[in-house]
Image: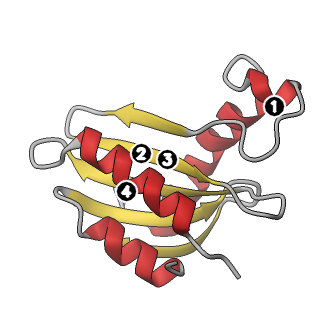
């Protein structure tokens, strides 16, 4: 089971990976980063992606299971596409009240979105925090 650094390294080994981060969506802080950041500032990117994750996790339109008392993150993952890349946010389920997600930034021309989504989900399941 990988820790933060090993998890980020595995994410960066995916085809087309440009940057990766593990982010706490309640605080907007990056717990770890690797590679590039889309805006050149990992902390600003963490804060911006945390806002997106928070919206998806807190609004029942996106996460109706949260309203029904479901345990764990209410959203499995988010995918945002841009003209030059993909942003994947994969929520991490833990034994405690987790508010952590993995963010992977992929190059649109060289990345494989389907493969990245599967692998990022696997990393999120295996990630050891603490």
Mark 1, other Cα within 10 Å: few <14 / some 14–19 / many ≥20? some
Query: Do the residues under discs 4 and 2 have CB atoms within 8 angstroms?
Result: no
Question: Which residue is disc 3 drawn over?
Answer: 89
State the CA–CA distance, disc 2 to disc 3.
Answer: 4 Å
Dot 3: what SS?
strand
> Is 121 situated left or right of 67 in this image?
left
State the CA–CA distance, disc 2 to disc 1.
Answer: 21 Å
Residue 85: image x %, image y %? 25, 42
Mark 3, other Cα within 10 Å: few <14 / some 14–19 / many ≥20? many
Q: Nearer the viewer, mark 3 or mark 4?
A: 3
Q: Is residue 8 above or below residue 53?
A: below
Q: Quadrant of residue 70?
A: top right
The disc, 2 or 1, on the residue closer to the chain's N-terminal end is 1
Mark 2, other Cα within 10 Å: few <14 / some 14–19 / many ≥20? many
> Is 26 situated left or right of 52 in this image?
right
The disc, 3 or 4, on the residue closer to the chain's N-terminal end is 4
Query: Do the residues under discs 2 and 3 have CB atoms within 8 angstroms?
Result: yes
Mark 4, other Cα within 10 Å: few <14 / some 14–19 / many ≥20? few
Query: Do the residues under discs 1 and 4 have CB atoms within 8 angstroms?
Result: no
The disc, 1 or 3, on the residue closer to the chain's N-terminal end is 1
Residue 88: which numbered mark, if any?
2
């Amino acid at each position: 089971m990988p820790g933060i650094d090993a998890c980020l390294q595995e994410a960066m080994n995916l085809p087309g990976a440009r940057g990766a981060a593990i982010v706490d969506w309640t605080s907007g802080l990056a717990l770890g980063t690797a590679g590039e950041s889309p805006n050149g500032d990992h902390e600003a990117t963490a804060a911006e992606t945390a806002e997106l994750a928070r919206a998806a996790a807190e609004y029942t339109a996106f996460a109706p299971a949260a309203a029904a008392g479901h345990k764990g993150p209410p959203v499995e993952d988010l995918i945002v596409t841009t003209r030059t890349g993909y942003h994947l946010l994969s929520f991490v389920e833990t034994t405690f009240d987790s508010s952590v997600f993995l963010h992977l930034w992929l190059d649109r021309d060289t990345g494989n979105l389907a493969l990245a989504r599967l692998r990022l989900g696997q990393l999120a399941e295996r990630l050891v925090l603490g």
